[in-house]
């Protein structure tokens, strides 16, 4: 199939016309990749069993791994799930934004969207293109990240093109994603809340709304996910480039020393632009080296490592709290669960 490519422009009328066309594709059961503030999504009508199945096929995704349903207005959640007072509070504070809330699903959502389960993840993105697309489609949009299953999530339309060109109907290019990692995924049980996947909405932020916040143990230790994790995505090898990711836990001096002693010609390292000259191997720059900058560059640089055919990529282990937890969670998975203590 030929994939139509549309780049968002300064011209509002043209954009709306293209998004109307994209909405029509979604309504009639096709697949459209679109930008969000976190990563690009691969969208299909969340009300159609066959459309949802096409997503699994295009991505090569295991069919028991549920899709997140995207809405343009938090009140729409009522139509697809049984909401609660806690949902309303969270929605008021964090939506639209990078938060996905898992709720008991209503019958209107087909089983293929939820991987056969009786809950559904709901997210209202803040990215304007995403929201206009959902509004114009007139249906909620089921969308996982728009990468081939197992590859790093796409943070630009070119990443989507590299993985899915010819397999989907349309790609909407809205530039680089603002955040760079996927949304925070939480499940609600009465007044208690569990973080299943950390993201830009952090534990501390959630505590301002909910007194009882727990972080699932598998967030920092993938080996604890078990055969039936709360979030099926936890058990799959995720966020992985072909290169081995080697996570090193120590201070900057020890990190630089270890990498320069160990790395070979076909190895690379994540480093801040101003630390570039301290390394003997290939440097993959990650802005000023802050957690926020590393998060922003993470997936693009893991893909770049593969373009360069690197064998190993050395990365300094981030903290396991605050916004760094989202980074740690992706890296520990990319590193196959291992951290080397320096
Ligand atoms: O930021 C994001 O969330 C992006 C953009 C496109 O919105 N989407 C995304 O979707 O990351 P995906 O499918 O790549 O990751 C969704 C994760 C998976 O690990 C899945 O197992 C989990 O959320 N999930 C979705 N629905 C769930 C449910 N009903 N119960 C438990 N886990 C669920
Ligand atoms: Mg994904």
Image: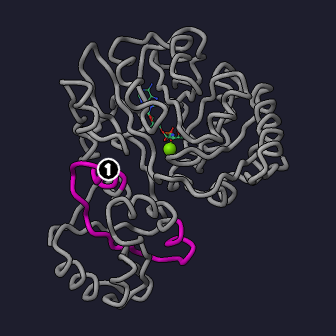
In this picture, residue 240 sits left or right of residue 317: right
Q: Residue at x 37, y 28 (%)?
A: 93
In this picture, residue 14 sits left or right of residue 315: right
Residue 233 is one of the magenta-drawn residues: no
Disc 1 crowd, CA 10 A, few/some/many (<14, 14-19, 20+): many
> Disc count in the image?
1
Residue 328 is one of the magenta-drawn residues: yes
Location of the C terminus (image quadrant) = bottom left
Where is residue 68? Give x, y as percent: 52, 30
Relative vertical location of residue 286 with respect to residue 338 in this rendering, above or below: below
Q: Residue at x 52, y 16 (%)?
A: 75
Range drawn in magenta: 303-330
Where is residue 316? Give x, y as percent: 27, 69
Which residue in the protein does label 1 denote?
329
Q: Looking at this view, is 74 or 319 the one in front?
A: 74
Q: Which scheme is used to colour this image of the protein?
A: one colour
Q: Residue at x 24, y 20 (%)?
A: 192
């Amino acid at each position: 199939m030929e994939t139509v490519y549309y780049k968002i422009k300064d011209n509002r009328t043209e954009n709306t016309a293209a998004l109307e066309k994209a909405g029509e594709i979604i309504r009639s059961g096709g697949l459209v990749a679109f930008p969000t503030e976190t990563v690009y999504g691969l969208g299909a009508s969340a009300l159609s069993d066959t459309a949802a199945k096409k997503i699994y096929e295009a991505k090569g995704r295991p069919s028991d791994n549920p899709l997140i349903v995207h809405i343009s207005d938090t009140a729409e959640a009522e139509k697809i799930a049984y909401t609660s007072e806690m949902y309303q509070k969270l929605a008021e504070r964090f939506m639209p934004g990078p938060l996905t809330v898992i709720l008991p699903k209503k019958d209107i959502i087909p089983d293929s969207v939820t991987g056969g389960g009786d809950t559904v993840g709901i997210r209202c993105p803040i990215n304007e293109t995403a929201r206009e697309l959902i509004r114009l489609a007139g249906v909620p949009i089921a969308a996982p990240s728009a990468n081939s299953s197992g590859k790093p999530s796409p943070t630009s339309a070119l990443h989507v093109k590299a993985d899915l060109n010819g397999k989907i109907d349309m790609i909407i290019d809205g530039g680089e994603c603002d955040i760079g990692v996927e949304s925070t995924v939480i499940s609600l049980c009465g007044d208690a809340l569990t973080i299943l996947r950390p993201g830009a909405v952090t534990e501390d932020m959630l505590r301002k709304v909910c007194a009882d916040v727990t972080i699932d143990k598998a967030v920092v230790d993938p080996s604890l996910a078990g055969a039936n994790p709360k979030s099926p995505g936890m058990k799959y090898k995720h966020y992985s480039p072909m290169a081995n990711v080697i996570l090193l836990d120590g201070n900057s001096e020890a990190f630089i020393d270890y990498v320069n002693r160990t790395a070979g010609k076909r190895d690379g390292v994540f480093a801040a632009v101003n630390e570039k000259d301290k390394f003997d191997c290939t440097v993959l720059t990650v802005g000023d080296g802050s957690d926020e900058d590393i998060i922003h560059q993470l997936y693009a640089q893991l893909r770049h490592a593969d373009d360069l055919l690197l064998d190993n990529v050395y990365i300094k282990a981030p903290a396991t709290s605050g916004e760094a937890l989202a980074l740690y969670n992706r890296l520990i998975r990319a590193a196959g669960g291992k951290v080397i203590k320096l």
